[in-house]
Image (spheres, rainbow, N blue to C red):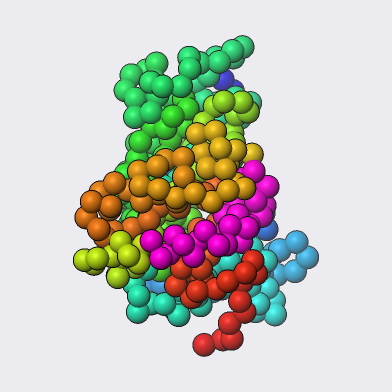
């Protein structure tokens, strides 16, 4: 399997420089979502003191396709690559007229979350991804063939079942160091496919933490010389697809008798299928159309819900049905979804009671 040239460079040589003292300076890595809506960019700025809060981090800029763009710091994490006191800074991108960039979906999502903060919406997102060599072949797959049929790989153990565990382990530990709310990880159904879970996080923070977890994943893979793909259908045929199942609840849903509110939310979701299809992948449903075929995944053209039904669009976990409270799991978001778009759509439909297929415009609050 081909690997990137940078991965072949001596990390021991690099380490002697990384151990040099920084004196009173801090490296702040500014990270933002680029014009694709899927990829991340980064650049580093030297600060003269360690920032204690996000308000201590100055705004910056970068050159967009035809003019300068502003970088507005929104969330700060510890840097697991350069280590303390250095920081990772997740930013919003604004145009020169100070309006959000086209792919800056955080801006509107924050307004929507602020409208329902008294309901304390919690989210958990299950991010699936697939490891590839830079030659485009899934990591560990035979050069001129395919691995054995799916079955033994999910949560599997052993060199013939777990393809790329070192990357998953390094990513998990780096996220914990950074302060990302990562809560689990496992090998997935297809060999070279993995999943990590982020949450529970309240409101806008789920998007911040998932995007940062994605950045850390890509950066870890860079060191190993492989590529992490969020393609929702990474390998054609009967191989497993890749999603980002999203768990959602409010304070009422989590309290005694909350199943009633969960069922009410599912009823609202059932009446807004097309809107959620567009919100759940960055290509407005085209990517998910390759994934949600009804084969071991929901059908993009049909809404379905059920208890412990992993083929349904929306699932009520069995423990939730038994306890009569908890959360719902929307299994439709694609692996490459924008978490700000997904969570905003859930709030609009389930809590703001929007109807129809177009989101409502709300005035500035």
Q: Residue at x 38, y 32 (%)?
A: 187
> Would residue 23 be visible to someone looking at this image?
no
351 vs 22: above or below: below
Q: Residue at x 38, y 56 (%)?
A: 328
Which residue extends farthest top?
Answer: 144
Count of numbered marks: 0
Q: Measured from the top left, where is residue 229 in percent x and y?
A: 56, 38
**Quadrant in the rendering for residue 163:** top left
Tell me if residue 166 is in the magenta stretch. no
Q: Residue at x 63, y 58 (%)?
A: 274
> Would residue 322 be visible to someone looking at this image?
yes
Q: Main secondary structure of the magenta part?
A: helix
Q: Does residue 302 appear to the left or right of 13 in the view shown? A: right
136 vs 195: above or below: above
Give the quarter of the figure containing the N terminus: top right
Span highlighted in magenta in the image = 263-289
Q: Measured from the top left, where is residue 144 in percent x and y?
A: 61, 12
Which residue extends farthest right?
Answer: 66
Q: Nearer the viewer, residue 254 or 125?
A: 254
Q: Nearer the viewer, residue 297 or 176?
A: 297
Q: Measured from the top left, where is residue 189 in percent x and y?
A: 44, 29
Tell me if residue 288 is in the magenta stretch. yes
25 vs 167: above or below: below
Q: Residue at x 39, y 16 (%)?
A: 160
Q: Nearer the viewer, residue 233 or 76?
A: 233
291 vs 117: above or below: above
Q: Measured from the top left, where is residue 303 in percent x and y?
A: 54, 51
């Amino acid at each position: 399997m081909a690997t990137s040239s940078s991965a072949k460079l001596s990390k021991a040589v690099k380490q002697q420089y990384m151990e040099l003292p920084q004196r009173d300076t801090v490296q702040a890595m500014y990270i933002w979502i680029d014009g694709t809506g899927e990829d991340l960019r980064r650049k580093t700025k030297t600060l003269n003191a360690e920032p204690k809060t996000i308000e201590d981090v100055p705004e910056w800029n970068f050159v967009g396709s035809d003019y300068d763009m502003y970088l507005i710091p929104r969330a700060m994490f510890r840097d697991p690559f350069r280590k303390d006191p250095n920081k990772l800074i997740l930013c919003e991108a604004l145009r020169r007229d100070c309006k959000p960039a086209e792919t800056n979906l955080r801006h509107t999502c924050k307004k929507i979350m602020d409208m329902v903060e008294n309901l304390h919406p919690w989210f958990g997102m299950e991010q699936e991804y697939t490891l590839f060599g830079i030659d485009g072949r899934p990591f560990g797959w035979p050069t001129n063939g395919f691995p054995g049929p799916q079955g033994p790989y999910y949560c599997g153990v052993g060199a013939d079942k777990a393809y790329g565990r070192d990357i998953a382990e390094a990513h998990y530990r780096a996220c914990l160091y950074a302060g990302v709310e990562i809560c689990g990880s496992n090998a997935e159904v297809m060999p070279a496919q993995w999943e990590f879970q982020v949450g529970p996080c309240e409101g806008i923070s789920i998007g911040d933490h998932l995007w940062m977890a994605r950045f850390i994943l890509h950066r870890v893979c860079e060191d190993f010389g492989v590529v992490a793909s969020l393609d929702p259908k990474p390998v054609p045929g009967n191989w497993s697809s890749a999603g980002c199942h999203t768990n959602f609840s409010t304070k009422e849903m989590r309290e005694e008798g909350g199943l009633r509110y969960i069922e009410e939310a599912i009823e609202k979701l059932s009446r807004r299928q097309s809107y959620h299809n567009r919100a759940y992948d960055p290509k407005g449903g085209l990517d998910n159309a390759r994934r949600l075929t009804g084969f071991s995944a929901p059908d993009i053209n049909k809404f379905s819900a059920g208890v412990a039904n992993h083929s349904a669009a929306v699932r009520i976990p069995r423990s939730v049905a038994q306890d009569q409270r908890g959360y719902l799991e929307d299994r439709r978001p694609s692996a490459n979804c924008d978490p700000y778009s997904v969570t905003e759509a859930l709030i609009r439909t389930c809590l703001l009671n929007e109807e129809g297929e177009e989101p409502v415009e709300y005035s500035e609050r």
